Image (cartoon, helix red, strand yellow):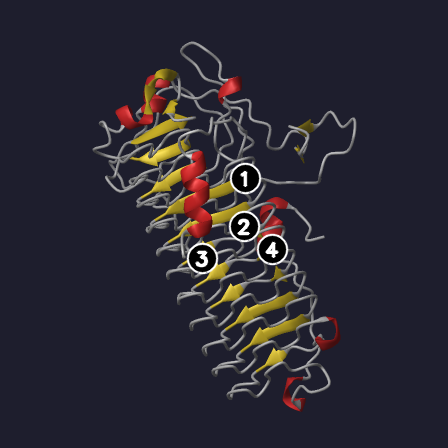
Amino acid sequence: MRYSKVAASLLSTVFTFRAKSYVVAGVFDSSNEAPGPTLVDTGILSSVNTSANGTTANPTSSPTPAIELKEKCKPGDTGCVHGRIRVPANKYADTGILASPLSAAKGTNVAPSSPITVASHHLTSLCTPGTEYVICVNGHVKGYPGVTCYEACGDGANCCSGIDACKGFSGRVCKDTISCSGDSACAYANIPWVVRSCKELGSCFKAGYGMGSIESIVDSCIGDFSCYNAAAYFGSIGKIQSSCNGIDACNWLGYDNGLVGDVLGSCNADSGCEDASWYGGSIGSIIESCNQYNACHGLGQKGGKVGDVTKSCTARYSCYYGAEKKGSIWSISNSCYGEDSCRKAGSDDGSIGNIAQSCKADNACTGAGSGLNGRITSNLMSCCNTGLECDYATQASLPATCNAAPTSAPTNSKSAKKRARTLN
């Protein structure tokens, strides 16, 4: 059954799990909240050049850093936070003072009256102009532990509607009648901004939980379990915008040390990016791609490495389980248009260079470059565009038109710049 994995976990945890508090990008650690009229923000934050509606002028440009994970902590390193991440000196440590609890709890697009010196991303609200938002810490209004986010949302009329919709949630939710609506929609999630997003059953359940990081979710994650567990447990995803709309669309995306850049206009289909980049996998930014059923399901999972995916993987199963199990694909652009066209390409310790203007027919590059003995060290540039032409191709069997040497390794530069994290 489609829901056997997620439903069982959701049903077994939603009523018994006790929320924990973590410091994540743009979300507050309630254990470090200062009492009284002012609140010290303990987030590890950075500035972002983003417009009020949460979009950038050029979505294909390199994302601005949300949090820098410089390196894993070494024993005895006093500069580490929670024993996990090292903060560059005098760069991201937040010493600013936020506005009063009441203004913070009832956030609006009007500049707060109290001084703010915090170097926080998205100081301007991402909500629709004039729309208020609620700042939540573990399911309660920041500064008012006796008030639930459900109550601050007008008893669910404006946000946090549904059974346990915002139970244990930390972040900002816009009062737009859409955000965090549905049973357990945002339960235990850590998301700095939820804007017209996270609608339906378990849609953003535990997204960003457990030291995970998601920069913002805007116009996204609409559908049952659509972003369930995304980036949870040390996973990392940049902005999710106009993406992940469909049943299971991005559930488990970047889960358990997975790394994903921005997701823009992508994964808008049932299971479109389900399981992608989980268990230590990595994918660069996903832009206008993976918008068909199972198109990028499992892409780069279990230690796989995939660079940016741009206007690619546009058919059913087109990039299904590509580069999984420690395989690698340097980048995919304007490619993999046919059904099963790049299915399991570069998987199982296999590899392929850049795929550009290639693999545009059904089964054109199925299994190409897969396995230790099937690795392809060339780029696929404007080749393999007829059915079965490069089906399970190796370097030796690759058409001569494809033998262009790769120019760079799959560094996932956009994600790496966001977090200064290597892919080792």
Q: Dot 1 lies on which element?
A: loop
Marks 2 and 1 sit apart, C-alpha to C-alpha, by: 9 Å
Towards the viewer: 279 or 90 = 279
Q: CA distance from mark 4 to mark 2?
A: 8 Å
Crowdedness near tag 3: few (<14), some (14–19) or many (≥20) residues, C-alpha within 10 Å: some
Q: Position of residue 132 (x, y in %)?
A: 27, 32
Place of residue 79 in the rendered image (x, y in percent of width and height, measured from the top left): 71, 27
In the drawing, what numbered circle is on residue 282? 4
Q: CA distance from mark 3 to mark 2?
A: 20 Å
Q: Is residue 6 visible?
A: yes
Residue 254's disc is 2
Residue at the right extreme of this rendering: 75
Residue type beneath disc 4: Ser
Q: Label 1 belongs to which residue? A: 212
Contact? badges 2 and 1 (CB < 8 Å): yes
Q: What amino acid is found at the position of numbered circle 2 in the picture?
A: Gly
Q: Nearer the viewer, residue 197 or 310?
A: 197
Q: Residue furthest top?
A: 36
Residue 89 falls left or right of residue 198: right
Q: Crowdedness of circle 2 by 10 Å Cα count: few (<14), some, many (20+)?
A: many
Sequence-earlier tag: 3 or 2:
3
Residue 381 lies in what quarter of the image? bottom right
Give the residue at x 42% y 48%.
Answer: 227
For residue 59, the mark is 3
Tell me: 326 left or right of 342.
Answer: right
Q: Determine contact: label 4, label 1, CB under 8 Å.
A: no
How far apart in space, not on screen, are marks 4 and 1 (Cα)?
14 Å
Quadrant hosting residue 284: bottom right
| Amino acid identity at mark 3 | Pro
Query: Measuring 29% from the left and 40% from the top, which residue is drawn there?
Result: 181
